Image (cartoon, grey):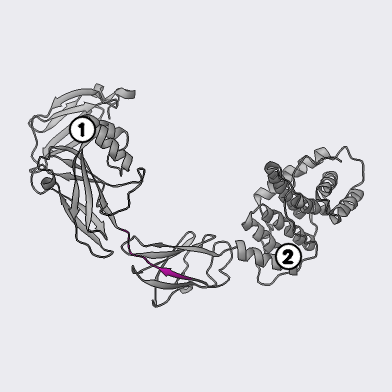
Amino acid sequence: MARLRFSHAVGALALAASLLAAPGLSAQTAAGFQNRTASESGLKLEAKLKREAGGDSRPVAELVKQGVAQIRSSSWREASVTFALAAGKDPRNEQAWRNLSVALTKVETDDYSEKETLRSQAVGAAWQAYQVSPDAKTKARALAVLSNALATSEDWRPAIDALKASLALADNADARATYATLRAEHGFRALDYSIDADAAAPRACVQFSEDLAKGRVDFSPFVALKGVDQPAVTAEAQQICVDGLKHGETYDLTIRAGLPSNVDETLPANKDFRIYVRDRKPAARFTGRNYVLPSTGQQGVPVVTVNADAALVDVYRINDRSLAQAVTSGDFQKQLDGEELDKLRDDQGAMIFSGELAVERRQNADVVTAFPVQEAVPDLKPGVYVMSARPKGETEAEPWDSRATQWFVVSDLGLTAVSGTDGVKAFARSLASAAPLKGVELRLIARNNEVLATKATDADGFVTFEPGLARGTGGQARR
């Protein structure tokens, strides 16, 4: 027996009965049901079958009759070969294309590649049947078969839309039951919920299978929170969020039927959730990405803690020669993980403090405590430092987990630099008095850490590096 050289797929919907206008289902546009993937697959399949049909001399009617007999005996692969020949010989034969799709979806194979090809061609064959169908009845039947082929490929949204279009053309009890099942299992529906319990103001969000309706839509009538008259509701993409929750409380949340989506479907039934907002996890963080401490005066870096009695704090000093490397590698000012902090301690700098910072504990509230840098490190030299913090008693983090990191600079030097066609100009002044600083030695550094030039500021705090120094390339290019 000849072996079919194209594809087949699993599972078929035997909807060969006629179909009439279905109440409650909107009609398709004048152009009818559209699906680019199915169209491309159908055109490709038609061209292939036309090329391969020339060697068979049997009439199309005989091939169709033989194919129907093979389907009745569940000889799916043989039927797919027969109907492929019929469709190739007569591309306008709706029955050949439709039955070819049914047969292809029923062919069984353990070969993954062949299975994928079969599924694609089952979709293409059903699309061709839809395209050549002469009236609403046959179009509805072809769309039902197309829906099944798409469902076999687990392409659920177009499968639902195709069957909906079929019912809009002609009603059918079996098709309507299948449509209801597809809608319930794969249509617009509420999937799950999540709770942002670690936020100072927690919220609960319900996720949906499709985007919510666009435009100016008031979703609040579709959200009920027991015990709260008018919950604060926001919608974004595929989720609805309810704000104003409290830690340690349990809520009954209902998403009501009728909630509109962006796929011309509404939520078919109420969806109830019983949610509990746990207390916030112990945490420590900083208030910003960088911080400048004057070399004299008050020296405190704010640490924010949640549900902690103390924070474990480490302070590292970056060596001057390692600073350029930290900048070019992208480490400067970013949050570091455990491995990067170990490397900082062992290779690029040194740990100069490790200890505890006692903090006030207020349940679930952000508590800001100034870490007394000068007290912890009395001999605090000008330079760049990194501080990390974590709540005391926290489960040991993985080395690759990000740690709360604060970069800070200890200096009385405020430096401004600009680059132009006339070179690089820099201005140094005191952070304490804003007065210009004379005699400050500044270095222009290349990407490869080579010092391109060293100059001292004049009485006005200015220094200029010649244009030629900034024209290097590669590693010699200035930073």
Callouts 2 and 1 close, C-beta under 8 Å: no
Give the residue at x 77% y 54%.
102
Quadrant of residue 68 in the image?
bottom right
In the image, taking residue 203 as reference, residue 367 lies left or right, namely left
The image quadrant that residue 16 belongs to is bottom right
Name the residue nearer the viewer: 275 or 295. Answer: 275
Structural distance between the alpha carbons of marks 2 and 1: 76 Å
Tell me what residue is drawn at x 87 percent, y 41 percent: 1
- Left or right: 130 as drawn, with respect to 473: right
Q: Quadrant of residue 241?
A: bottom left
Visible residue check, residue 441: yes
Q: Indicate the position of residue 388 as horizontal and vertical percent values.
A: 25, 46
Residue at the spot 17% in from the left edge and 24% down from the top edge: 454
Tell me the amino acid under the disc marked 2.
Leu
- The amino acid pointed to by label 1 is Asn
Mark 1, other Cα within 10 Å: few <14 / some 14–19 / many ≥20: some
Can residue 168 be seen by looking at this rendering? no
- Callout 2: helix, strand or loop? helix
* Residues shaded magenta: 273-281
Which residue is located at x 25 percent, y 49 percent?
Answer: 389
464 vs 432, nearest the viewer = 432
Assess whether residue 279 is covered by the magenta stretch: yes
- Which residue corresponds to mark 1? 319
Name the spot of residue 29 as percent of width and height, x first: 66, 60
Give me the disc on residue 169.
2
Label 1: which secondary element: loop
Say whether disc 2 or disc 1 marks the residue closer to the N-terminus: 2
Specify the quadrant that holds the C terminus: top left
Measured along the vertical axis of the image, is residue 31 above or below residue 220? above
Q: Count how many numbered circles sit on residues in the image.
A: 2
Question: Residue 246: x percent and y percent?
Answer: 34, 69
Is residue 293 rendered magenta in the image? Answer: no
